[in-house]
Amino acid sequence: MTDTRLVPVILSGGTGSRLWPLSRAQHPKQFIALGHATLSMLQATAKRLQACGSQAPIVVCNHEHRFMVAEQLRGIDVPAAAIVLEPVGRNTAPAIAVAALEAIRDDQDPLLLVSPADHVIDDDAAFSAALRTALPAARDGNLVTFGVTPTRPETGYGYIKASGPGAAPVASFVEKPDLATAEQYLASGDYYWNSGMFLFRASVYLRELQHYAPEILAACQAAHAAIVRDLDFLRLDEAAFAGSPSDSIDYAVMEKTERAYVVPLAANWSDVGAWDSLWSILDKDDDGNAVRGDVVLQESKNCYVHAEHRLVTVVGAKDQIIVETADAVLVASRSHAQDVKHIVDRLKTQQREEVTTHKRVYRPWGYYESIDGGERFQAKRISVNPQCSLSLQMHHHRAEHWIVVSGTARITRGNEKFLLAENESTYIPVATRHRLENPGTIPLEIIEVQSGSYLGEDDIVRFEDAYGREGRTD
């Protein structure tokens, strides 16, 4: 019997370095509500695919982002069929392969609708229509990609040439062109932007991967065969997966297979790869400015200004990107938006924390936010979600003072257990086992003041943890 299920595969492994300082390694763009959106890009993707009548998604992400993926999906009532953790990044061909292997468990063979987590599609109806056009070709055993109808001579995207209208065989894949070539592509009407979204049966993709990139499939099969379940997550075998070549699905399969089809997609799509692409899809004022937050502009044109924590005023600027966060500010010409990644690379070589984390760091139980710090002390604001708890833990080098701002805290300190209400406080000595819990129905907010000779986040020993992190520092 033919498997008629449609299973989304959401690829959520990117870091979005060109959208720094908003997007960072531990909280990249797919987990952020960009522009005027209320949902994160991951959430919007999951909702869009759910609306197409699909099954629960398989999400492929890296280990560090696992709790954000789970929490954001729970926040929109979209349960995942599986959250597969990549121990190392190996590009899209292996990521899709392990998702396909997971999908064919128990002799199933669904259609896989593959989508990155960090793309924007404003016209869901147009996307659904393109999907309906693609379904017959995919059911017939072809690998369908969605080609975005170009709206400008874009030099930052790869292109696909179609052999005809509708769902048609791919004539050729084309690398990123220069401006003159991109203008010719746009004028011809035969070329589409390569969206990185696909539809195919799981077995068909694995068969083509076996034919064109057998070393990738062998490594993924070994990694998946040794998979370990960790709460809601599936951990691939690290050694086996690391042995896979790192390659995109385009290079590994799509540019070689004789079964590549393309379906046009005109849905106001953007991969939001850099600040200028975000500016291009946002609503703007009469002077071409797009803003978010507390922003005042004077005689400025064609700018994107993003204010996170304070008033930002701009006078006489043209074609600028200005992004303010709690600990970093970016000012860049829109024409150099792609070069933000070079700034990120420089900050990496300097081992700057601003590349990796924000002031606010999310954890499976809530978040903490650095308030102040100096020699031998650090102050944080901690928010614990209702009915959640931190691990039972100990620190070798620091003591902690906790002051409850709102909510009720249940404290474990050594052999003691007690409750703290608003405006009450306690002290956790160095090397004392302790735990912070929120037994209530509203968020627990506390101020934590750390003191000691070393205040790094890796000074933690976990004895018990509801999230399977015993012995880990993340």
Image (cartoon, rainbow, N blue to C red):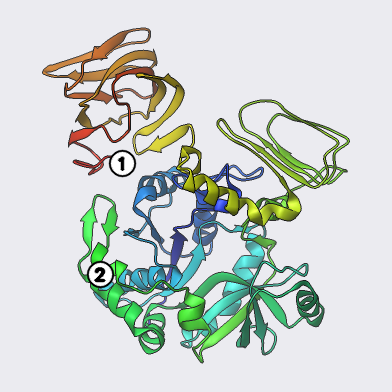
- Residue in the foreground of this view, choosing between 357 and 262: 357
Q: Circle 2 sits on which residue?
A: 240
| Rendered location of residue 298, percent (x, y) | 86, 32
Residue 43 visible at all: no
Q: Are marks 2 and 1 in contact (CB under 8 Å)?
A: no
- Residue in the foreground of this view, choosing between 317 and 119: 317
Question: Which quadrant is the C terminus positioned in?
Answer: top left
| Rendered location of residue 247, percent (x, y) | 44, 74
Query: Which SS class for mark 2?
Result: helix
Residue at position x 27%, y 24% from top?
436
Could you tell me the amino acid type at mark 2?
A: Ala
Mark earlier in primary sequence (2, 1):
2
**Which quadrant of the view contains residue 464?**
top left
Q: Circle 1 sits on which residue?
A: 474
Query: Which SS class for mark 1?
Result: loop
Residue at position x 67%, y 66% from top?
156
Q: Report how far apart the C-alphas of labels 2 and 1 lie in the structure.
A: 23 Å
